[in-house]
Amino acid sequence: MSNAFWAPVSIRKRADGTTAVFPHFIMDRGKPGMITVDQRGKRFLNENTSYHLFGIAMQKANETTPSVPAYLVTDAEGLRKYGLGMVRPGSKGFAPFLAAGYLTQVDTLDQLAEQLGIDKAGLADSVARMNRYAQTGVDEDFQRGTTAYHNANGDANWSGPNKSSASDRSRARRSMRSGSIPAILARRPASPPIPTPSVFDREDRPIGGLYACGNDMQSGGNGRGVYPGPGITLGPGLAFAYLAARHAAARAQAKMKLDCDVLVLGSGAGVFRRRSRRRPAACP
Ligand SMILES: Cc1cc2nc3c(=O)[nH]c(=O)nc-3n(C[C@H](O)[C@H](O)[C@H](O)COP(=O)(O)OP(=O)(O)OC[C@H]3O[C@@H](n4cnc5c(N)ncnc54)[C@H](O)[C@@H]3O)c2cc1C
């Protein structure tokens, strides 16, 4: 399960029949007034955690309670302000999303639970708890808003006591949802990381001139069971590609020098003259 980097995504069929996939990275799931619930209507994770841990939490929760798909729930104000998945902020143009079943729009939480086929009492309890946490600023269940990372995924301009977790939704008129499922963002090799772009043979000897970059090599950030943050795949990919290119260039220069040395040392003057037409340009 963890030999990959994960992200929650929502999917929708486009009018032309193709599938659109939206990764819920940072734009919605951790904003004030948004909660994620399983099919019992219960929150089961800190919505502001990294998308990698979010994806893992969904799968873990799903072992005991159906949590794939899970549902992102907000109200009209949350939708207007932050958008929801493919629905952009501004609360316009819902029709195709409603028609596709990507978005559900109702007047009460009970109706929402009915339409989603999830537990009414569970959903009501989750929202009531979250509204209470909005007043206290303390998420007693999942400690949302207790780290700088959570708050960065929240709303810095939020005036309530917790910038990531809460808003008082007791006045909510509509509830919206978007179903989300975990999807692989990037593969991560199972074996331990190695700090070089060289490819090794079965006896752990570097195979000269063969390099691996990107997720198929095992950089310092990959393979340790953690996801330090965005950039952990492309960053090392770039860095090790640079190292590989430098190594390859140095190897080519060394080989060229060796060719030249052999040529000079191994040839008499006459031979040298005969071979000089094929002499590498950089040879002295
Ligand atoms: C929506 C999204 C957002 C992301 N955002 C970020 C981000 O902000 N920061 C970050 O660091 N990472 C991010 N990632 C992850 C990052 O994009 C990947 O980890 C990275 O692109 C992997 O690079 P790679 O070169 O290892 O593999 P790939 O980019 O998958 O390249 C592998 C290539 O090999 C080709 N290939 C496969 N099989 C064969 C074959 N048999 N023969 C020939 N060619 C083949 C494929 O076509 C492909 O072009 C994101 C990923 C997604 C999906």
Image (spheres, grey):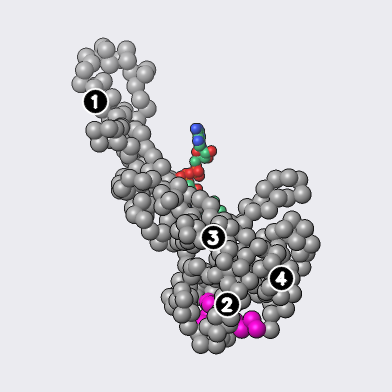
Is disc 1 placed on a helix, strand or loop? helix
Q: Of callouts 4 and 3, which one flags the residue occurring earlier in the amino acid sequence?
A: 3
Disc sitting over residue 67 in the figure: 3
> Which one is in front, 284 or 140?
140
Disc sitting over residue 183 in the figure: none
Magenta stretch encompasses residue 175:
no
Q: Of callouts 4 and 2, which one flags the residue occurring earlier in the amino acid sequence?
A: 4
Q: Is residue 97 above or below residue 163?
A: above
- Label 2, residues with CA under 10 Å away: few <14, some 14-19, many ≥20: some
State the image coordinates of residue 247 (x, y, percent, origin top left): 33, 40
Q: Of callouts 3 and 1, which one flags the residue occurring earlier in the amino acid sequence?
A: 3
Q: Of callouts 3 and 2, which one flags the residue occurring earlier in the amino acid sequence?
A: 3
Mark 1 within 8 Å of ligand 1, using the beta carbon: no
Cα–Cα gap, marks 4 and 2: 15 Å
Q: Residue at x 50, y 85 (%)?
A: 137
Magenta stretch encompasses residue 169:
yes
Cα–Cα gap, marks 3 and 1: 67 Å
Q: Residue at x 50, y 58 (%)?
A: 62
Q: What segment is highlighted magenta in the picture? A: 162-170
Cα–Cα gap, marks 3 and 2: 17 Å
Label 4 sits on what residue type? Answer: Gln
- Per the image, the residue denoted by label 1 is 261
